[in-house]
Image (spheres, helix red, strand yellow):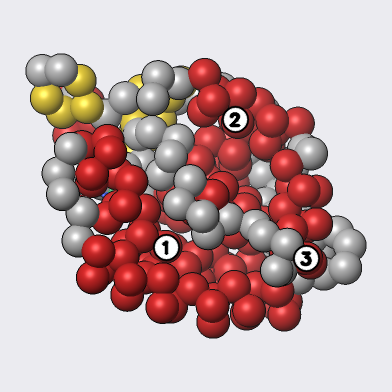
Amino acid sequence: MKLYGALLSPFVRKVALAAQEKGMDYTLVPFRTREGLDPGFVAASPFLKIPAIDDGGYTLADSTAIVSYLEARQPAPALIPAEAQLRGKVMWFDEFVDTIHCEAGLKILFHRLVGPKLLKVPGDETIAMQGEAAMPRIRDYLESVMPDDGWLVGDFTLADISVASILRTLTAVGFGPSDDYPKTQSWYERVRARPAWQAVAAIEDAAPK
Ligand SMILES: N[C@@H](CCC(=O)N[C@@H](CS)C(=O)NCC(=O)O)C(=O)O
């Protein structure tokens, strides 16, 4: 399976982690080359957002759609529980990250790191500050739902992957796990200890910056 994108994106990392946890083969493919956008990526992602996949000619975009596909293709180990209430909570955390946490966090990331440092376009500090203003409530919420031990919703699930992925991305701009949120921090350390996390982190750390 080709996975188009870059692992700094929490959405791309989410898909890589899900595939890795399931032991599924994937190859990370840069969506942009010197010549422009990869035509395979353009064909796979109608709105040119990362991630997108090409699995033997089957194309799909959107991290949650892709993880749902992976879950159906290879049910074990389950990352989306079958039981109704657990499944509802897992999808809540995934959606909370995709909309609320990323909405705030990516304003900071894009305007302080991706724009000015990677794409060489000026960031807008007013927008970054809007994102920053939303962060305390988000971080307080997460701390309030963190378990003392184990995972967010029963067994290890997509909920843990989604939340840990945005936290890793936001570490780059000072909004990752911190001593001020000790339960979140120890849960994050448990996620980081997983072999799948370490495998994806090794790929990410080795990628050209
Ligand atoms: N809901 C989508 C969000 C994907 C997304 O917004 N990706 C960003 C990168 S983090 C992107 O491709 N942005 C480029 C753009 O919006 O044109 C998902 O879960 O995959």
Within-10-Å neighbours for mark 2: few <14, some 14–19, many 20+: some
Q: Where is residue 209 in the image (x, y as percent from the top left)?
A: 38, 25
Determine the image quadrant of residue 197.
Answer: top right
Which one is closest to the eye, mark 3 or mark 2?
A: 3
Q: Where is residue 62 in the image (x, y as percent from the top left)?
A: 36, 51
Closer to the N terminus: mark 3 or mark 2?
A: 3
User: In the image, what residue type sits under mark 2?
Assistant: Val
Query: Residue lying farthest left?
Result: 35
Per the image, label 3 sits on a secondary structure element best described as: helix
In 3D space, how far apart are the residues under numbered discs 3 and 2 (Cα atoms)? 24 Å
**CB-based contact (under 8 Å), mark 3 and mark 1:** no
> In this orientation, does residue 98 appear?
yes
User: In the image, what residue type sits under mark 3?
Assistant: Pro
Please tell me the numbered disc located at residue 26.
none
Within-10-Å neighbours for mark 1: few <14, some 14–19, many 20+: many
* Residue identifier under label 2: 200
In 3D space, how far apart are the residues under numbered discs 2 and 1 (Cα atoms)? 21 Å
Please tell me the numbered disc located at residue 182.
3
User: In the image, what residue type sits under mark 1?
Assistant: Gly
Image: 143 above or below 172: below
* Residue identifier under label 1: 105
Q: Nearer the viewer, residue 31 or 168?
A: 168
Closer to the N terminus: mark 2 or mark 1?
A: 1
Q: Where is residue 161 in the image (x, y as percent from the top left)?
A: 62, 51
**Residue at point 41%, 71% (across, down):** 132
Q: Nearer the viewer, residue 66 or 120?
A: 120
Image: 129 above or below 34: below
Per the image, label 1 sits on a secondary structure element best described as: helix
Q: In which quarter of the image is the N terminus?
A: top left
Question: Under 8 Å from ligand 1: the CB of mark 3?
Answer: no
